[in-house]
Image (tube, helix red, strand yellow):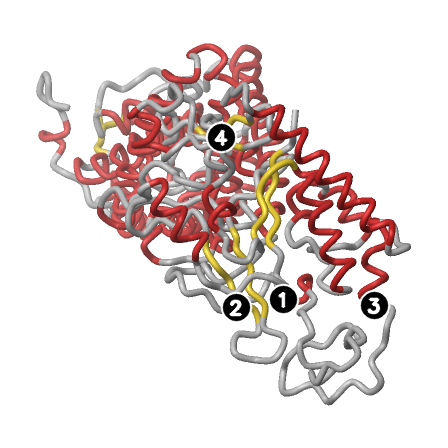
Amino acid sequence: MARMKFICDAERCIECNGCATACKNEHEVPWGVNRRRLITVNDGKPGERSMSVACMHCSDAPCMAVCPVDCFYKTEEGVVLHDKDLCIGCGYCFYACPFGAPQFPQAGAFGLRGKMDKCTFCAGGPEENHSKAEFTKYGRNRIAEGKLPACAEMCSTKALLAGDGAVIESIYKTRVQRRGKGDEIWGWAMAYKRGDAVAAGVKS
Amino acid sequence: MKTSWWPSRQTSWRLLAGVAVSLGLSFGVSAQTAPAVAAAPVAATPVAAPDTAPVVKSAPALPAGSTAQPGWNVPPKWSDVELKPQYASVPGREMNVLLEDKGQWWRTIRNGPVTFYGGILMLVVPALLLVFFAVKGPFKLHGAPSGKLIERFNSAERMVHWTMALSFVALSVSGLILLFGKYVLMPVFGASVFAWTAQVMKAVHNFVGPLFMFSLVAFFFMYVRDNYFKPIDFTWLAKFGGLLSGSHVPSGRFNGGEKVWFWLSIVMLGVIISVSGLILLFPNWDSTRELMAEANLVHGIIAILFMAASLGHIYIGTIGTQGAYQGMRKGYVDETWAKEHHEMWYNDVKSGKAVQKPVGAAQPAAGDD
């Protein structure tokens, strides 16, 4: 089974926010919740690069580890999903996630957290595929439709790649070799092979 | 999640991957050595980098005929910038931070030592108290009860004590369920029922917390006067209240042990747990994730110590000491109890130095709680 991953190619990203917009539109994400966001480094200076950030669907997902009600689960494709019926809105996944992926709609006074919402890799949730309940809680299940995540499909420069990790990695590496720069696959060491990365002193 | 369409798509990806890899090989470099490519070719003279743009790699050689300035469009070294705030168009606290690495540290400690040793402590302390009770039994009165009662705690003091005590128990139970319920209750209840329980417990924790804090403040001002340390308390502590020797150590209204409990647990742990709890209680304060993770650790560790200490307090105040519970339950203790446990206070009461209701009022009417 393919292992689903994201890559954002900073050499190509033009910070158009198309991915964030596509995601919001596809899933009708509520106001104040951003499953995907753009971060720009060296904004307005030479060497400016942008990065599209969302849930990386980690191998050893910190959110899963700290959830006090174990509402997270992993699909066969390595996609980290969660069950909003179980979520109690404690915010622990939000503390633990290095990517800032978990989002909480405000559910009451004093910033009371509602059910957590995050990128689903367009794979819906535990409800029946394409059901109304699934759409309301998690958004569209494009994976069940045989499609890849909306953000990557919508990306105008194909900076954002989503799909089988081995495939998108080879696409990315080909790009790196052809252009001779931009070789860091940002976030992968944190998300997929943390142990190795720490041993090698790699932080990205 | 299932689709018959998927494998064919995958196959086409594989083909694409094969093409991509062979393309890479045709450049004479395997995919794994790609990083070296970026670093190898050095441009003639890197132009002085403007202001703060981090130049960490020499710029790649420009294609022939390019008019671009070498050294200007150098990508950042992600490991240097990913922890620092950058620019993000999405508003919100820390939305502009690429990576937050303190979360992993928090996870390791919370899921590790806090859960493990905390859980052990929560089992060992009650077990030790039970063993102590089984071996030593309760501290009994040596003399016969006189039948005469004197007031030890007035109704306001008792109300504040029990507000604090009951809110403490509610917070303990809900807090324990949030930390250990996943391992203890979930296998029994199943995911749905346990999640519902945890949801209720989270609400209980959130709403009872402030009540506990108010009672803490009221308790402090009500009890602090009688909890100042006096020389006799150090004697009491040095002799451990005569617990081991069996000798009688006089004390004022509160003995050394009670004062330690007051200052170290109620005041010190109470303040720490309240402050860390407030940080966690109000996400709208826009605390950073790092601060909230730290507050969570402090809150959990202090809560476990507080619970362990309070188990000792509850033991001594109930089954461990004959007559102690009635003092806080009804407000009155027998004179014999007062003389044996708090001799100096008893003398003060008798000599009229300690404020005391008239003895006539000291007999509680039936049903007067």
Which marked residue is nearer to the observer: mark 2 or mark 3?
A: 3
Amino acid at dot 2? Gln
Q: Quadrant of residue B78?
A: bottom right
Under mark 4, the amino acid is Ile
**What is the secondary structure assignment of the residue under circle 2?**
loop
The disc at residue B39 is: 3
Q: Residues within 10 Å of mark 3 (few under 14, many from 20)?
A: some
Q: Is mark 1 on a helix, strand or loop?
A: helix
Q: Where is residue B217 in the image (x, y as percent from the top left)?
A: 29, 50
Please give the label number shown on residue A143.
4
* Disc 2: CA contacts within 10 A as few (<14), some (14-19) or many (>=20): some
Q: Is mark 4 on a helix, strand or loop?
A: loop
Instruction: Give the answer, above or below, for where A44 lies relative to B361.
Output: below
Write down the chain letter for disc 4: A
**Residue at mark 1 to residue at mark 3: CA–CA distance:** 19 Å
Which is more foreground, mark 2 or mark 4? 4
Checking the image for residue B81, the label placed there is 1
For mark 1, name the chain.
B
Lower position in the chain sequence, tag 1 or tag 3: 3
Amino acid on which the number 3 mark rests in the picture: Ala
Q: Can residue B110 be seen in this view?
A: yes
Mark pair 1, 2: CA separation: 8 Å
